[in-house]
Amino acid sequence: MNHAKLIVAAQVSKAWPFEEARKLIKRFPQGKPGGAPVVFETGYGPSGLPHIGTFQEVLRTTLVRRAYETLTGGALTRLIAFSDDMDGLRKVPDNIANRAVLDANLHKPLTRIPDPFGTHESFAHHNNAMLRDFLDRFGFDYEFVSSSDMYNSGAFDDALHGVLRNYQAIMDIMLPTLRAERAATYSPVLPISPLSGTVLQVPIEVVDAEAGIVRFEDAGRTIEQSIFGGHAKLQWKVDWAMRWVALGVDYEMCGKDLTDSVRESGKIARALGGRPPEGMIYELFLDENGDKISKSKGNGLTIDQWLTYGSEESLGFYIYREPKSAKSLHAGVVPKAVDEYWQFREKLSTQPVEQQLGNPVWHLLRANGYAGGASGALGGDKLPVTYGLLLNLVGVLGANATRDQVWSYLGNYIADADPAAHPEVDTLVTTALAYNRDFIAPTLHRRKPEPNEALALAALDEELAATSDDATAEELQTMVYEIGKDPHFAFEGLRDWFKALYETLLGSPQGPRMGSFIALYGIANTRALIAEALAD
């Protein structure tokens, strides 16, 4: 693909990653002066296990990063995945076993709390490792940065100097935003207690800004202590602003629950002599009850749960779509996301460049490390079987179906039905078996056919008996259509006929194209299903 043509198309593309990247183009049309990288940042609070809400921020930020690189013809960039692991643990998450370990260490920095899972140096190290594992599995290019490492090593000391030098300016920004009770004890700096090791929420007095010495009360004692070298951390909004300035962050997005924080942290960043980053405020994910997903509650889906029931690509696809609209995040959305991803992937190679840049798969492939041009992005790939059809197959086979059993049926539908030849299908076979076991099999119920439906099923059986085993899915679909349109069976429409097939043969109110299902399941096996339905 001609890169000049690609850039021209990207300059006017309405795809949201390009719209976001154009904000940065106004700041750095060809990258930062002197060749320094444009810095993208994402934040993670490891007070709970990572969930998809955490992962989505890294993915979406990466999409903007790649869009900016496209617009600039390859300007240097870097992505920092920052963990707020210096925070004190305020509440024990609901979904954590061995809670007593955490209860005994409330309000200590997360990296100074033992790991309740017994596998890592601390609770934060465990959760950070889980996040990094998935980001690595997806192929992200990022630099992991720990807040505790930055504070403890002194890397933030210069920035902390700036906070103390501008202490009153920061207080003037924050105090008007606080309730009177909160304002009475508010401090931008949170010292670490030398007595208990906890993060203290107490007023402080700046004794010597240049030396970093502050004074505060701790358990009835007056303490003077340096804030450098990990002996203090900053309040959240001040910490965010300090980080932007210290790390030179140029772009960071966040959820709408942080709208006020973005505004106030931006003012603090300016007070510190820096410039707030560009960014997007996105809508939040909701669970199946419409509640915000939360690390502490453990509601919604975890990363591992999505990958149990769907593919990595489908997760990225679901996250890409409509970031400024609230979306439900539960197991029920997974199958549709899987099939829609492959529908968009199949279209890619046939689309003109302008449409390709609006295709989610174009962006996802680049985020995942693919560096080709617009028309070379693996377009035209097509799965030989849809995920929906696989779910219907395993639904008929039952909760105890096996991978080998499913592949034996795929031999009816795929010429070279070998897992090694179709690794993407093999992944979906595994996830379909899990999805069927946990969500479909417990709900299936095949009802007895009505008299007219029984006559139509008998007619279908008769037609199948006279049909060759190598009949195509389209030929079988036409056969099903013709029976449904026959006035002798008195269906009000084809919709009623297909609903009858789904409910009497598959035990579900919805289902696949029946021609495709019969071709996959096999004519003899389908006739056996009909016999069972008519025998009830």
Image: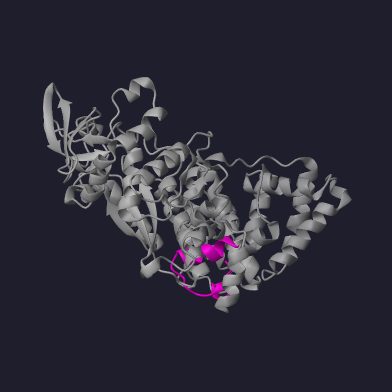
Where on the picture, by quarter, is residue 206? top left
Where on the picture, by quarter, is residue 211? top left
Q: Residue furthest bottom?
A: 2
Residue nearest the observer in this picture, 137 or 266:
266
Where on the picture, by quarter, is residue 390? bottom right
* Residue 381 lies within the magenta run: yes
- Name the image quarter holding the C terminus: top right
Q: Is residue 74 above or below residue 203?
A: below
Q: Note whether residue 425 is visible.
A: no
Task: Tell me: 245 left or right of 361.
Answer: left
- Name the image quarter holding the N terminus: bottom right
Q: Residue furthest right?
A: 487
Q: Is residue 275 above or below residue 202?
A: below
Residue 406 pos. (x, y %): 51, 60
Residue nearest the observer in this picture, 477 or 150:
150
Residue 162 pos. (x, y %): 26, 45
Task: Tell me: 152 left or right of 433.
Answer: left
Residue 182 pos. (x, y %): 34, 24
Question: What residue lies at 48% left-to-right and 44% top-to-bottom?
Answer: 438
* Residue 370 lies within the magenta run: yes
Task: Tell me: 281 left or right of 110.
Answer: right
Task: Tell me: 84 left or right of 432.
Answer: left
Magenta-colored span: 359-385
Q: Note whether residue 38 is visible.
A: yes
Question: What residue lies at 25% left-to-right and 36% top-to-bottom?
Answer: 189
Residue nearest the observer in this picture, 477 or 315:
315
Question: What residue lies at 78% left-to-right and 54% top-to-bottom?
Answer: 459
